[in-house]
Image (tube, rainbow, N blue to C red):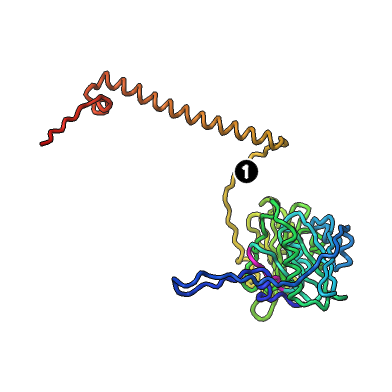
Amino acid sequence: MVGIRAKRLVACFAVLSLASVARGQQRPSAISLVPAADWKLLSSRTADVDTVGQFGGDPAIEREYGVESLEIRSYELGGATVEAVVEASPDPTTAFGLLTYYATGEITFFPGLARFFLGHDAALMADRRYFFRIPRGNGTASRISDKDIDALLFMLVRSYPMAQQDLSLPTDSLPRKGLIAGTEKYLLGPEAARHVLPSFRTDLLGFSQGAEVQMGTYSSEGGGRSTVLAITYPTPQMARARYGEMESILDLNQERGADSVYGKRLGSFVIIVLGANSAATAKTLTDAFTVSGGIVPNERYPGDKPITIQMMELIVNNLLFAMILAGVAMGGGLLVFILKRVARKFFPYNEWVQADEGSLTVLRLN
């Protein structure tokens, strides 16, 4: 398969602004480059997750990433019909994970927009919490051009409005230097990990404890390749326990030829390097990861109170805060009044005391 060319993706989703070079020339003009293929929606139906097997997916993988049902849409363009599978996942991270699992080539990223993979057999897209799949391997769909598929992807994106849970986007956190394009995977469960890492003991990763794994393959000097696993745990304590178990079972950081496994723990992260040709190569890869932290106070859990009660409590608390401020202001004014009275008694000629007494200014003008 081949990945999407950046030029074609820009034509699908971008608006090109043509700005004048010199000041004072005409205002910049905007030209929409979205393909104008006239796709028509023929039908839409809901299906069970097991149906994804008919479209090149794996029901076990879909369930592991939190997909509970599918929406299958049929479109028509110039006599050719295409079925698009829409999978609603719990959040953008799981949708991105599905894309990385099924993509077999380079994924094109646009900050704040969708992630794409366009191949000969399927077009894949992750946008917000939705994962889209358009099979192209057989039937009339195989004769549709990439440009028309781009237009259909754009139509699918616009069919699903943004919701509150769609605001967060997964980040591209793997170091880019030396990373082989198309090898990134985001794993959230043992089923996907077993398929991607068949020779590694995936039970050591700790998915049952909330582990999440980002992996990628890196090229090294001499033509060698190394696989890097960046494992995230909910707490540093869990990471320490898991790393200790890996250290004893996998003989981490021991020279054992092609079977050598190297590792490093950084707070709640564990970095594992597989297939490195030397300890120096593994150290270069692990040193590319850095961790920085900060203290963020947790918000108080509002409980199971209805939203109306929570809003009323917020209003009452704001009123109490305003009354406290007014009381502080009145108390400060009263304190100043009392202090001036006392100062007038003991220091009658003080400037601070006499400032409040009236005075007459006489101007002699000729």
Give the residues drawn in magenta, as a range. 106-111
Q: Nearer the viewer, residue 237 or 234?
A: 234
Going 50% across and 73% down the picture, which residue do you hit? Answer: 20
Asked if residue 212 lies left or right of residue 286, the reply is: right
Residue 21 appears at what percent x and percent y? 48, 75
Secondary structure, mark 1, is loop
Quadrant of the rendered image containing residue 91: bottom right
User: Could you tell me if residue 356 is visible in this image?
Assistant: yes
Going 84% across and 67% down the picture, which residue do you hit? Answer: 83
Q: Residues within 10 Å of mark 1 (few under 14, many from 20)?
A: few
Q: Residue furthest bottom?
A: 222
Q: Main SS type for the magenta part?
A: loop
Residue 13 appears at what percent x and percent y? 67, 68
Residue that numbered label 1 is attached to: 298
Asked if residue 82 lies left or right of residue 352, the reply is: right
The N terminus lies in quadrant: bottom right
